[in-house]
Amino acid sequence: MAEHNTSEERADDMQTQQAIAVEGLTKIYGTGESRVAALAGVSFAIDAGEWVAIVGPSGSGKSTLLNLLGLLDRPTAGRYALAGRDVAGLRGAELARTRGELIGFVFQSFNLLPRETARTNVELPLVYAGVPGAERRRRALEALDRVGLADRAGHRPPQLSGGQQQRVAIARALVGRPTMLLADEPTGNLDSATGADILDLFAELNAGGVTLVVVTHDSTVAARAGRVIEIRDGRSYERDTVRATPAQVAAPRQLQGVLS
């Protein structure tokens, strides 16, 4: 059986494609008087290799949007193309495979199993994907090395700092060799210095071709992105149309009025 392509190889395949294209994306919860439009016709595109920040006040629809982009939920209406493919028809195993191959998730709360080692936590997506044990261990150690934690592979989350735990979570997101990372407030539980280290790691990953979509309330985090999309009242607004190169996003820059 042929090996899966690496994220770098898949990124090369996607050079002429958009990583994400959404048009009129709508998500409605409830019916009748309890009907709430969490998203009300969001439209934008993200090129492969971009680093985009999604900002907006609490309740604006950011998390709902991230769940839709991550194929964790389905829109009520609208179109979503992932790597050039309309995902509306994906179901069951095909949906899970597409999500596992193309998308890695990073969360504010790390979501690590406290009784398992860093290596075991990183291996988990590969367990669900049916990857053999020896290959899982090799790829988990490779991912931990990529985030600078090869020497902490045998440590459990309570033995690690917050920044180290987030790096383990990022390694877990990378172990499936995705072309895109979706991050929800990835520095929210970290002090400013540790958060800056995580953003430096994101910049390295982006320079290597990984598409980054980061939901954040933090203007410092948004300032590292190449482009900012604001979600307000369930709709999307471009707040910065400059598409920075990976080299440019490796250094902080100021955005005026990122968060209103």
Image (tube, helix red, strand yellow):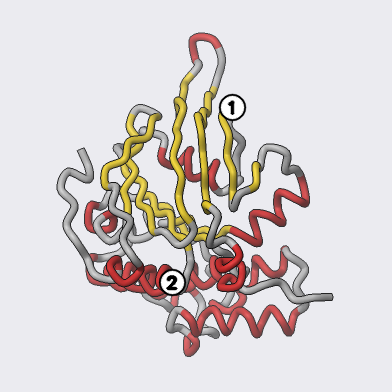
Residue at the extreme front of the image, as rendered: 16
Kind of residue at badge 2: Leu
The kind of residue on which mark 1 rests is: Thr
Mark 2 and mark 1 lie on one chain; the one further toward the N terminus is 1
* Badge number at residue 76: 1
At horizontal 61% and vertical 49% (from top left) the residue drawn is 84
Residue 141 sits above or below residue 63 on the image: below
In the displayed orientation, state which residue is furthest to the bottom: 151
Does residue 26 sit above or below 137 in this rendering?
above
User: Residue 137 at x, y = what percent?
Assistant: 66, 82
User: Image check: 207 left or right of 113?
Assistant: left
Residue farthest top in this picture = 33
Residue shown at the point (31%, 48%) measured from the top left: 228
Of residue 159 and residue 249, the one placed in the foreground of this image is: 249
Q: How many marks?
A: 2
Label 1 environment density (alpha carbons within 10 Å; few <14, some 14–19, many ≥20): some
**Image position of 60 (left or right of 103):** left
- Secondary structure state at the residue bearing disc 1: loop
> Which of the 4 quarters of the picture holds residue 166?
bottom left
In the picture of the structure, the residue carrying the numbered disc 2 is: 205
Is residue 121 shown to the viewer in this render?
Answer: no
Seen at 33% across and 56% down, the residue is 243
Decide if residue 63 is on the left or right side of residue 143.
left
Disc 2 on helix, strand or loop? helix
Whether residues under marks 2 and 1 lie with C-beta atoms below 8 angstroms apart, the answer is no
Q: Where 120 sits versus 50, above or below?
A: below
State the mark number for residue 245.
Answer: none
Identify the residue at horizontal 30%, vertical 66% (top origin).
249
Vertically, is 123 above or below 66?
below
